[in-house]
Image (spheres, rainbow, N blue to C red):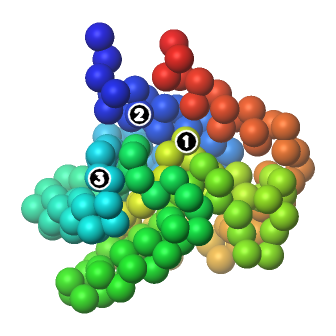
């Protein structure tokens, strides 16, 4: 029988494969994923303090394990409110700076209710950052810089993602996310 963490990782992996990689929202994700260099960590933290402790634990894991290229830290029991999540992301970035990780790791964020500041909540573009669970993505800055250097027009990736999500439409983007979420019911 699968554990709750196994189910959460399966949902997140499905989302990563079908949305992030499948729609090419991050052209750098496929090789890292196919090489098994993505670490998935489920946090059962219930307080902001514990969420941040888990973040530093994952940064330390990356410090010790160069074979891991990137980590998705998945929050199962916390940071469900999107505004609280954004506040937590700001604090997390400050903490990473204070811990000496500026220029070492970059944080990206994903949330089931992600909404860009200039978007309506039903804008399909929001689904470029919507995920089955609140999560922080720790990315090795040096690896990201190398990938960007070898990718033509990397600065246009976000706008291309927004355009694709809008072309696919709200129902399609919702169904892709829902597909991953429904895995827990199997």
Circle 3 — which element? loop
Q: Residue at x 65, y 77 (%)?
A: 155
Which disc is residue 132 wearing? 1
Discs 3, 1 touching: Cβ within 8 Å:
no
Q: Residue at x 46, y 58 (%)?
A: 79
Q: Nearer the viewer, residue 182 or 22?
A: 182
Residue under label 2: 8
- Left or right: 5 as drawn, with respect to 175: left
x, y (%) of residue 66? Answer: 18, 59
Q: Give the mark, 3 or 1, whose residue is nearer the N terminus.
A: 3
- Local packing at callout 2 (Cα closer than 10 Å; few below 14, some 14-19, many 20+) is many
Q: Note whether residue 26 is visible.
A: no
Discs 2, 1 touching: Cβ within 8 Å:
yes
Q: Nearer the viewer, mark 3 or mark 2?
A: 3
Which quadrant of the view contains residue 83? Answer: bottom right
Q: Residue at x 68, y 45 (%)?
A: 23
Label 3 vs label 2: CA separation?
14 Å
- In this view, 86 is above or below 171: below
Which disc is residue 45 wearing? 3
- In this view, 133 is above or below 53: above
Label 3 vs label 1: CA separation?
17 Å
- Left or right: 160 as drawn, with respect to 36: right
Circle 1 — which element? loop
């Amino acid at each position: 029988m699968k554990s709750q963490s196994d189910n959460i990782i399966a949902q997140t992996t499905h989302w990563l494969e079908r949305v992030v990689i499948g729609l090419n929202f991050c052209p750098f994700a496929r090789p890292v994923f196919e090489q098994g260099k993505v670490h998935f960590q489920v946090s059962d933290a219930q307080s902001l303090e514990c969420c941040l402790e888990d973040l530093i634990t994952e940064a330390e894991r990356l410090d010790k394990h160069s074979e891991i290229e990137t980590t998705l830290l998945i929050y199962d029991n916390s940071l469900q409110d999107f505004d609280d999540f954004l506040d937590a992301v700001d604090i997390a970035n400050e903490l990473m700076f204070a811990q000496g990780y500026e220029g070492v790791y970059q944080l990206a964020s994903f949330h089931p209710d992600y909404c860009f500041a200039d978007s309506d909540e039903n804008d399909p573009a929001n689904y470029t950052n919507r995920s089955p669970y609140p999560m922080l993505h720790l990315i090795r800055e040096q690896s990201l810089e190398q990938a960007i250097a070898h990718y033509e027009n990397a600065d246009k990736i976000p706008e291309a993602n927004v355009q694709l999500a809008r072309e696919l439409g709200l129902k399609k983007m919702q169904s892709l996310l829902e597909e991953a979420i429904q895995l827990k019911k199997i």
